[in-house]
Amino acid sequence: MTGPAASTLLSELAAALSEDRVSADPELLSQKAHDRSYHSWEPPLAVVQPLSTQEVSEVMRICQAYGIPVVPRGSGTGLEGGANTSSGSICLDLSGMKQIIHIAADDLYATAEAGVMKSELNAALAQYGLQFPAGPGVDASVGGMAATSASGTTAVRYGTLKENVVALTVVLADGSVIRTGSTTKKSSSGYDLTHLFVGSEGTLGVITEVTLALHPVPEASVSGVWSLPSLESAVALVVAALRSSLRLTRVELLDRLTVDALRRYTGYSAPVTETLMVEFSGSGAEVQAQYAQFAELAEQYRAAEHLTAADPEESRQLWQARHDVLPATLALVPGATAMATDVCVPISKLPECIAETKADLDSVDLLAPIVGHVGDGNFHLAMLLPPGDEQALARAKEINARLVDRALAMGGTCTGEHGVGIGKIGPMSTEHATALGAMRAVKSALDPAGLLNPGKVLG
Amino acid sequence: MTGPAASTLLSELAAALSEDRVSADPELLSQKAHDRSYHSWEPPLAVVQPLSTQEVSEVMRICQAYGIPVVPRGSGTGLEGGANTSSGSICLDLSGMKQIIHIAADDLYATAEAGVMKSELNAALAQYGLQFPAGPGVDASVGGMAATSASGTTAVRYGTLKENVVALTVVLADGSVIRTGSTTKKSSSGYDLTHLFVGSEGTLGVITEVTLALHPVPEASVSGVWSLPSLESAVALVVAALRSSLRLTRVELLDRLTVDALRRYTGYSAPVTETLMVEFSGSGAEVQAQYAQFAELAEQYRAAEHLTAADPEESRQLWQARHDVLPATLALVPGATAMATDVCVPISKLPECIAETKADLDSVDLLAPIVGHVGDGNFHLAMLLPPGDEQALARAKEINARLVDRALAMGGTCTGEHGVGIGKIGPMSTEHATALGAMRAVKSALDPAGLLNPGKVLG
């Protein structure tokens, strides 16, 4: 798009919204052009900041008329470049859409605009004794979480965004506004468009409002840190727990390297070995019973309890270690950044997948602590990249590519929760060998001009 | 299609499968031309009975070449005419696809061919201490349950088929075979085609294999029958339970008429009033604690315990009453059939929705006991139609239409679990006013010639 045409486009967008919410300020362009990943980006033509679904609709209508690509953006916490812009595109920044539209406490759902952060929603829910526990540890926008099909440590109990988004407001490529799903607990009425948009990363439509399932805040919880003699025994213990009447709220695996990093970074004192952090929640009597049952099971797998926490403050401190993993890992190499992998495999394949990956890592000079949402078969390597070390980046990309191949060969997926973005387009044709054509057909049907987040998900 | 062309088509199908699995026997045509509903049907050209995904693919390829509509069929237990055929179509009877392909006990999933019945799957799972609890009370095929997005009494705990189908093998309109989803617990990889096909009732593709999430068989359970002074108090008690740390495995509402019908039909002795049947399951200690907590809550809503059952045989007897509801209801009017309604509303709207519906029923001469999956906001009227009474049928259709309007006005859905089929096409344009265009675009993209189960879901 040449200068004068771009200038007309921006004027038209400014007229539809307001001058101060259509910006070509270079600093803002750079700031909003990328997520937290290592993937490349170019500054967009402009950052557009709508405040309502109607304004998003106007933006889409105008961009459709000009044939300008639109890259929707939430809070920018993505890890695969899903919100990264190319030159000539518009960054559609939804972070200003902050309204919590409705909390239906008795019906256990809430509707919020795309830019509402998970923390903001939970703050509003507290007075009802309710929570939205799904999603990543990092604070993120509800629109971004839905678009990525995000999850995190609580998926083993509460599911991912897939299981927790019940309805959506979506602006389609041509600017039309649709409402998908229902605020009822279930429905068999028509095609499930809600789940088509969840995880579509802005390539099929722009999610502007999200209706989410809510859950009661548990009365009580008990957490524990357990040291295991091996990776195999850790996974076997978790499988046994999942096949029993136990209901884990969280179960996180920390490998030796991660434990070592935590010990260096904080006052963490657990032995340097494979470690499980577990949590049970519910009524007071019940969580004690559940934890005792888990302890009995753990003994069979030669697990040793290192720490336990039953009161909220102790529990917060215990779980702080899990939140400290990233900074502790980064502190191992001064100035380093981390490239995160995200494969997910059937749980029974976890020990083999992790062991082979560790062997692969040993063959190259890369430090990569591993943490895993072990109840879901999903784990992350944090591959440490010393500043400016292009060779380390290249090695990390190779490790990641081999890890993805390994996971796919085991019946796994290239991404458990980070999404495809730019970073996982390569494996899509292997993972979805037969289904890719149907995905392309759906994309063409909903975005015939290919203006919604081009180059993402399907490439 | 004229006689000779039809005969060529049938010969080609017989050559692709085998003579004895392509039939135009009038008795078989009538038998396979409809489900259990009151909706109209015409005998198809032929009943085709493939035994593998590959054979389904062949059938689709041939029917596409001839431009012949295909109506997929599972076990025929549908209630909205989703599997009803029109003249000139082919009935694709998948009930012979009976292989349980894989049980991954440690990974908590199983893959079965479409014709495998829920009871058959559960029989095979028993040796692993696992179960597939989702789906309707009536035995049904896994393919049919997935295609309908079915559920039943256990949805409050385990979710519907939506939450329990993790991957599918689907034959598309042109005969190509695709695999959707992943056998991992979660994935953010590509568009969620799995959920697009779940609930699409054979209009987007033919589901030939279903991968389902499995759950441990609980160690213990406690059930109870509770009498409530009013509908309002029954719903309020359930809402309070859902907002607490209780985890209901089942919670069913029986209205006075239903209780009365059961008393006449069996030795059922509960008082004739609004009644809740509840179940808690898990470890032994835990279910006792949960039931005690529920009993405490129930007192606040003036509920009186009528019956409780903790051992499996007592529990089976207690829940037999719920299974007896349909025969007991039918026995109220000699020779009658029942038309089932299926709206679902946000739970807080249940008392109002049911009360208004009862008032509407009182205005016409129709007997219609009500049972409800009250934890989901879903309830069924069983409107009794005396044999040959066309006027009663007409009145029942009017009641149903007004009920659907009422539910939609309350933010509900026209079908909680029975599907759209033929019977709910009318309300689709109201319920999905804005989204219907996107649904049609998806349909056109995947079935451009409109040969997959035409006239269903979108009309």
Image (cartoon, coloured by chain):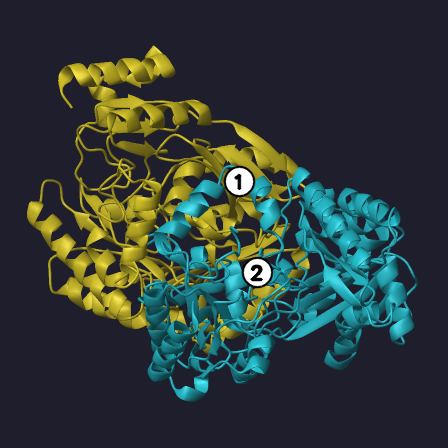
Chain colours: A cyan, B yellow
Where residue B329 is drawn, which disc sits there? none
- Residue A204 in view: yes
Q: What chain letter is assigned to the residue under label 2?
A: A
Q: Residue at x 66, y 56 (%)?
A: B284
Q: Please say if B263 is above or below A430.
A: below
Q: Quadrant of residue B331?
A: top left
Viewport quadrant of the N terminus of chain B: top left
Left or right: residue A180 versus residue B218 is left
Q: Residue furthest left?
A: B391
Q: Amino acid at mark 2?
A: Thr
Residue at 63 percent across and 53 percent down: it is: A415
Looking at the picture, how far across and down is residue A406, in whole percent? 71, 41
Question: A456 or A251: which is nearer to us?
Answer: A456
For the residue pair A294 and A36, the one nearer the viewer reads as A36
Residue A195 is situated, as x and y percent measured from the top left of the image, at 45, 56
Q: What chain does badge 1 belong to?
A: B
Amino acid type at circle 1 is: Thr
Residue A240 in sight: no
User: How many angstroms separate mark 2 from mark 1 (CA)?
Assistant: 18 Å
Q: Which mark is residue B211?
A: 1
Vertical relation: B350 (above or below) B32: below
Q: Nearer the viewer, residue B57 or A70?
A: A70
Q: Which residue is mark 2?
A: A160
Task: Give left or right: position of B36 versus A332.
Answer: left
Residue B181 shown left or right of residue A169 in the figure:
right
Q: Where residue A168 appears, x then y in whole percent?
A: 41, 66
- Please indicate whether residue A276 sits to the left or right of residue A184 in the image: right
- Up-down relation of residue B205 to residue A233 (above or below): above
Tell me where residue B368 sits by quadrant. Answer: bottom left
Q: Secondary structure at mark 2?
A: loop
Contact, CB < 8 Å: mark 2 with mark 1?
no
Mark 2 Cα-neighbour bin, 10 Å: few <14, some 14–19, many ≥20 = many
